[in-house]
Amino acid sequence: MKATSERTGPGRLRLSRSAPTVIVVGGGDAGLAAALHLAAAGVRVRLVTEGGRAGYLPGVPDVILGRAPVSRLRVRLELPQIEVIAGRVREVRPTGVRIGGDWVPADAVVAAPGLMLARQRAGGEADRVLPCWDLPSSARAAGRLSAFERGTVAVVISSLPYRCPPAPFGLAMRLSRHLDERGRGVRVVLTTPEAHPLAALGPEPGTHLLEACARSGVEVRLGWTPDREALDSGRVVGEDREPLAADLVLLVPAHRASPLLAPLAGEGPLVPVDQQFQTRWAGLFVAGDAAATSYPRASGAAVASGTAAARGVLARLGLSERGEGGPPQLDCYVGHGGDIYSRLSVRYPQGPPPGGRPQVLIEGPSAALGAEFAEGFRGWLRARRSGTR
Ligand SMILES: Cc1cc2nc3c(=O)[nH]c(=O)nc-3n(C[C@H](O)[C@H](O)[C@H](O)COP(=O)(O)OP(=O)(O)OC[C@H]3O[C@@H](n4cnc5c(N)ncnc54)[C@H](O)[C@@H]3O)c2cc1C
């Protein structure tokens, strides 16, 4: 479809009554960024997201530690310039989406459903192994952890990629401090399949995390991969079938593609896209954690990809020139316990990897960065309640 539009100034559009409709699936960082960019360009945006709500994933460790209820971190989207539809999308196509039994047509679609966590078959070691890398699963883990008095807790990273690479290290350190303060006789172990943590970002971030874990009394086991078949049935043993010596396992499960995107997924859970985040189905764009990029699965990358996908949609609809945004700016906060945080800021001054090398600035740990992390949540809330970033 060719939209009728009129330029009224640099970058500004006045749209005729036949303004095109774009459906955005998912109210996370990527979906919201895409929706706001499209709405600002005068496009009619319909944002479909489960329950009409968005969830604050950096709050997962707070939920596990019993410091925040999920209800505080999962909020209704109130966006004056965007029609928010509460619903679960069953199918996406370039020409629209299916919600329940209804087909909702559109001139283009941006799908940003994030990643899903691998499910385990019932049974296994349900009492010992607690998957916990989204809000609902972290609430279940919190209940079990609060009753845990003594023994070894392991934070186990199943496989790569997973959301926010430094976050499991932060969880382990906060856990160690939290249990220590409560006088529990608990040892905390973290396992990762990587030979050096966060290797894709160079050696320094991993060294920072290893040193911090050592100071916090967290023992890190590098290059440890749980056996995949056993994991599927809810058991955690090494590839050599050796059981992990832990009384409780907080599991960062394998991440999977949303079933919505299964026909488009490549090898692994990520969907191949071009530079505009368009998939091989012209008119269907995929942004955020779900899109195959060489950046970490982090909020800054999700926002940048949502904005780039929106630009791609506008160009496709003939509403703007094709243009590329720069590489994303990533800021990951790592809890060290007691409201002390460090920050890993990742920039790509030479362009995206593998051509451009990441530049990482490591700051803290400090209480000031802890205050910034808390302020980040307040900013996230404001954006979801007023549609401003
Ligand atoms: C523990 C943890 C800590 C983190 N800490 C940081 C940090 O410090 N810094 C940082 O930059 N990043 C951090 N991240 C990563 C960051 O939260 C993600 O990269 C970001 O949320 C990805 O955004 P997204 O929009 O792609 O997906 P999501 O945020 O997962 O949003 C997807 C949305 O789509 C909806 N949805 C899914 N399927 C459907 C469907 N079929 N129909 C309708 N709606 C659907 C979901 O309900 C959800 O609202 C952290 C992540 C975790 C798990």
Image (spheres, helix red, strand yellow):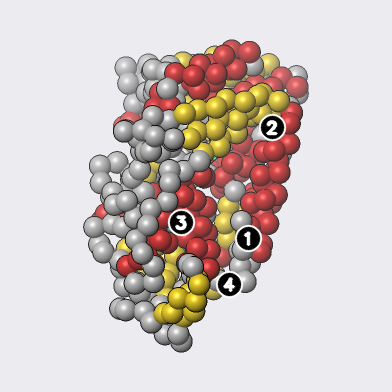
Spatial CA span between label 2 and label 1: 23 Å
The residue indicated by pointer 4 is 81
Q: Residues within 10 Å of mark 2 (few under 14, many from 20)?
A: many
Q: Earlier in the sequence, mark 2 or mark 4?
A: 4
Q: Earlier in the sequence, mark 1 or mark 3?
A: 3
**What numbered label is drawn on residue 299?**
none
Is 33 left, or right, of 181 in this rendering? left
Q: Which mark is residue 307?
A: 3
For label 1, the residue is 388
Question: Is there any visible trace of residue 249 in the rendered image?
Answer: no
Callout 3: SS: helix
Verify CB contact (< 8 Å) between mark 2 and mark 4: no
In the picture as drawn, the residue positioned furthest to the bottom comes out as: 17
Which residue is nearer to you in this view: 172 or 374?
A: 374
In depth, the one of 84 and 34 nearer the eye is 34
Residue 384 visible = yes
Work out whether mark 3 precedes mark 2 in sequence or the reverse, and give the earlier one.
3
Label 1 with label 3: CB-CB less than 8 Å: no
Q: Position of residue 171 (x, y in %)?
A: 59, 29
Give, as a three-letter code, the residue at label 4.
Gln
Separation (CA) of disc 1 from disc 3: 14 Å
Asked whether the residues under the numbered discs 1 and 4 touch, taking CB atoms below 8 Å apart as contact, a structural biologist would say no
- In this rendering, the answer to whether 312 lies above or below 69 is below
Classify 10 Å Cα crowding around label 1: few (below 14), some (14-19), many (20 and above): few
Residue at x-position 32% and y-position 51%: 275
- Name the amino acid type tagged 2: Leu
> Where does label 2 land, which residue?
369
In the picture, which quadrant includes the N terminus? Answer: bottom left
